[in-house]
Image (tube, grey):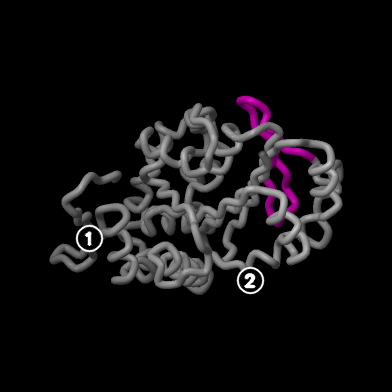
Amino acid sequence: MIKFIFLYAISRSGHTAIKNWIGLQCFMPAYSLDCSGHIFKYDQENVICINPKQYDLFERNIINFTFLKNLFDKEKKFTIIVNCENFKPNQEELTKFVDKFTLKYIEKRTQIFQIIEFRDPYNNMASLLKLRKGENLDSFMYFKNLMLEYINEIDNKTNYIENKILINYNKWIFDIEYRKSITKHLDISFTDKGFLNISSQSSFDKNCEKADEMRVLERWKYFKNDSIFRKIVDDQRLHDFSLKHFNFYLNFNNSNKKATIKRGFSKTYI
């Protein structure tokens, strides 16, 4: 069986760790591709970066059809994960990366999955602020607006992607049963390979490579008094989304003017 997995996510949402975790549990050989020309091959417990010229993969940032056809001719089963980082979650946006001809070729010959991965907006934005320190408000407003488009698709206010699979990063980090359920949706065997020893390239934990040792749900505290952070995340749309999917939101409207956590009533992951 041949699988193509399109993974939509916003920068610093934890999708790199999830992408590699999926790749290590899929049919081998497995590859991940992104629009910058990077190719990663998954080999048992390892993630290997390959020189793009070796495979002649990309032409003008579009997936090279010749590469795919050669792979189809050579292998009876394989997996490719297409990293659609910062792409808007819709088919029209996808064709900027995979042209329509190639997409039709893939659709006829493979099992296709489309994933939207997301992290709570507060920690996602805090990680972006940490990584892109010194940039102005407009730069981060772009990501906020992109986040709102993701929220609309996740909550089916838009429905550009049918039969989409949602992956909640906060749950993925701490809930093994949730990780098992993801592999069932993707029709792959659950091994949990790579979960504890994949670096997520954190902008906070430069030397930490174990997912369960990273304080990924406390990033917002670093920016709780930052004016840009407040301007971006103090938005009722983000609060409602966070409460619905992560069981908490940040309350900025209190007497001491400090951001505080407000929780719902079900199981929480922060």
Pick whichever of labels 2 and 1 is earlier in the sequence. 2
Mark 1, residue position: 258
Q: Amino acid at mark 2?
A: Glu
- Could you tell me if the residues under marks 2 and 1 are in contact, i.e. CB atoms within 8 Å? no
Mark 2, residue position: 92
Q: Which residues are magenta?
A: 31-50
Say if 53 sits above or below 228 in the image.
above
Give coordinates of residue 122: x percent, y percent: 36, 57
Asked if the stretch drawn in magenta spans residue 53, the answer is no
Say if 215 sits above or below 104 in the image.
above
Q: Which quarter of the rendered picture does the N terminus lie within? A: top right
Q: Is disc 2 surrounded by few (<14), some (14 to 19) or many (20+) residues within 10 Å?
A: few
Give coordinates of residue 231: x percent, y percent: 36, 71
Q: Main SS type for the magenta part?
A: strand
Asked if the stretch drawn in magenta spans residue 35, the answer is yes
Q: Amino acid at mark 1?
A: Lys
Q: Nearer the viewer, mark 2 or mark 1?
A: 2
Say if 212 sits above or below 86 in the image.
above
Asked whether the viewer can see residue 140, the reply is: no
What residue sits 77% from the left and 38% below the top? 50
